[in-house]
Amino acid sequence: MSLLLRLDSEGLNAIIEEMAEATEVGARPAAQAAAQVLYDEVRRNVAANGMKTAKLYYSIYQVYSQSRSKPGLATYQISWNRKKAPHGHLVEYGHIQRYVTYVGRDGNYYTAVRPEMRGKPKPKGRASQAAKDAYYIPLATPKQVAAKSFVRKAVSKAEAAADAAQTVLLRFINNDT
């Protein structure tokens, strides 16, 4: 006795091909769903840190990265606009405060300048510590300002972001779009 089994894989190949196409088309919406979860968490973290001017909060962005993406792979970046909130890295990573600061009439923070240096050009960012000490009023003792991570802390939502991406991608695969 013998048994003959024939399998026509044409139907299966068609299904696999459809799934591959759906996955490629759904990659960007799925990545955006994941990015949205992380973006929302970053903004929540900034708000939870306490806001004085909300510049950092409103500088948070998410953007599709064309250069890092390709068919079937979509990449989004979430960060803060350094022009709108140049202090973001000081909040994210912490810093040492060496100089006296004050809040101006406009509500912004400024570094106090020695009276004899007013009107003179500020030292460049790469100037020596001695040049900066001669221009600004140093604190008696520099103080360590602790980091209040808002981007790195958002990684705790990576599983929720992956779930959001999976939900969207499955909709594309199941043709529920």
Image: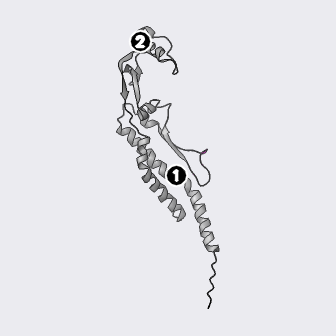
For the magenta stretch, what is the residue range? 66-74
Residue situated in front as seen by the camera: 176 or 137: 137
Residue situated in front as seen by the camera: 14 or 106: 14
Residue 130 place in picture, x, y as percent: 47, 15
Residue 11 place in picture, x, y as percent: 62, 74
**Camera sees residue 40:** no
**Camera sees residue 86:** yes
Amino acid type indicated by mark 2: Arg
- Residue 72 in magenta? yes
Q: Which of marks 2 and 1 is in front?
A: 2
Labelled disc at residue 100: none
Q: Which residue is drawn at 46% across and 54% down?
A: 162
Q: Is the magenta stretch mostly helix, strand or loop?
A: loop
Q: Dot 1 surroundings within 10 Å: few (below 14), some, or many (20 or more)?
A: many
Residue 85 place in picture, x, y as percent: 46, 31
Q: Name the residue under label 1.
A: 31
Residue 87 sits in quarter: top left
Q: Mark 2 points at which residue?
A: 114
Q: Are marks 2 and 1 in contact (CB under 8 Å)?
A: no
